[in-house]
Image (spheres, rainbow, N blue to C red):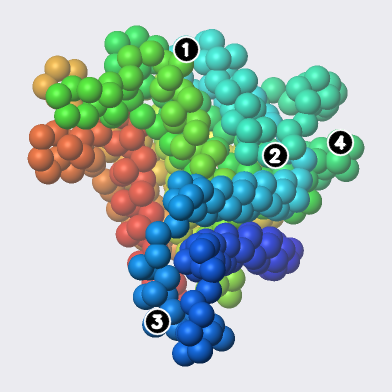
Amino acid sequence: MQRAKYKELKANKEIISKYTFLTILSLRLVRNLSCFSEGFPTSGNDIPCGFNYALISKCKERRVKNSMFFVLYPLLIALCSMFFAVNSGHTAQKDFYGRIALFPFENLSEDKNAVAFVMPLVRDGLESIGLDVLDEDTLEKFLLKERIRCTGYITKDLALKLGEELNVKTVFIGSINSFYSGENPRIGFSARLVDSLTGDIIWADHASATGDDFTGILGLGTITIIDALAVKVIGKLHSSLTLSLPNKEMESTYRIAVMPFQNNSRVKDAGIAVTYMFIVELFKNKRFIPVEYGEVRRLVVDLRVKEKGELDLKKTAAISGASGVDGIIVGTVEKFSEGEGAMPPEASVNARLIDAHKDRLLWSDSNDTKGDDNIFVFDMGRMNAAETVAYKAVSNLVKEMGKTTWR
């Protein structure tokens, strides 16, 4: 099923490539034609049977009376071609993703109004790039009928039912990891797009920022209100919804289940936030295929896994058999701090990878990252939020895990 997705993707990309070719061709044609705006050279040697260098040289010596027209005309052609290319891209995206069910994001922030503020912006962003989003009333009735309380993840069975009953092809789910509207506002999301037929993740990304992240030279550019910051970050999240999947060789990838992380920090939902970050980074890594967290959550309930951050090796076989995974990740969030005064934000995460087929520990590591780790000049490279720092820590861990040799 996933290979079929790649073939469909390739066909869509070829459509866009044709429009790109037309754009380039139009620009070259108009550039050459503009040379002959006052007529062709009349000498026998200069009769054109192609654009030779002598002919072009003579054309350049002539002055085109309506020079402004020939400056604007290529630009007009280019803009028109780009318009058709963009619209073709939007059409291809719409066909690829189909009708999307946009689930209300899971609110992991401390602001109870975050979901009501964010979701209209997320919907507007999806629709602005030409995607077909299921109307809210229809989705709400479905969620009430199915008694769905948490919308931050989805099971394979529910995704399939959603697709069959509401003609939905994909489900857009996510979490609001941080939302602060005070001085130096901050906001962050993790999001995934799930195929309603297979339950597989077909896109995942993370985006976060603070107002200070946009401060430039002389202190200019700082964003001071949450509204403007939210638009920026959501725009960044949606910009990665391109028609491209990670370059993965299906025969050499490993299917991974991420168990809920134990949270030893002082931030209430740091454990689940980091869990979602791991899923995003695994999706981006060419060696791994993460299982949608809704399926993992179902297994946690069915197998009565009580402890977070740990896993009885006796249950790995059951998890592997039920989900078809090759590996299971467990871990702990030790620190998730925004920092105060001169102290930078900091995150400390440890993780372990269990071979689900052999019931043994395959890899383990920890990462402690601070907001000032990557500063190189004039505070450039500083990370101003705990979420950004935590995501960097997770990215480092997954990168190292990708070097593991499976035996």
Mark with earlier residue (2, 1): 1
For the residues carrying marks 4 and 1, which lies nearer the camera in this image? 4
**Residue identifier under label 2:** 131
Q: Nearer the viewer, mark 3 or mark 2?
A: 3
Q: What's under tag 1, amino acid-wise?
A: Asp
Q: Looking at the image, is mark 2 or mark 1 nearer the viewer?
A: 2
Image quarter of the N terminus: bottom right
Q: Amino acid at mark 3?
A: Tyr
Cα distance in 3D space between marks 4 and 1: 32 Å
Where disc 1 sits, the SS reads loop
Q: Which residue is mark 1?
A: 111
Question: Disc 2, disc 4: CB below 8 Å?
Answer: no
Helix, strand or loop at mark 2 = loop
Residue drawn 53% across and 30% down?
175
**Quarter of the figure with residue 162:** top right
For disc 4, the neighbor class at 10 Å (few under 14, some 14 to 19, many from 20) is some
The percent position of residue 69, horizontal first and vertical second, equals 51, 48
- Residue wearing tag 3: 53
Q: Amino acid at mark 4?
A: Leu
x%, y% of residue 216?
21, 29
Number of the front mark, 2 or 4: 2
For disc 3, the neighbor class at 10 Å (few under 14, some 14 to 19, many from 20) is: few
Q: Would residue 12 appear left or right of 364 to someone viewing this image?
A: right
Residue 335 position within the rendered picture, expressed as x and y whole percent measured from the top left:
28, 31
Mark 2 surroundings: few (<14), some (14-19) or many (≥20) residues within 10 A: many
Is residue 405 visible from the viewing direction of this image?
A: yes
Q: Which residue is mark 4?
A: 166
Label 4–label 1 contact, CB within 8 A = no
The residue mark sitting in front, 4 or 3, is 3
In the structure shown, which secondary structural element does the residue marked by tag 4 occupy? Answer: helix
Q: Quadrant of residue 390?
A: top left
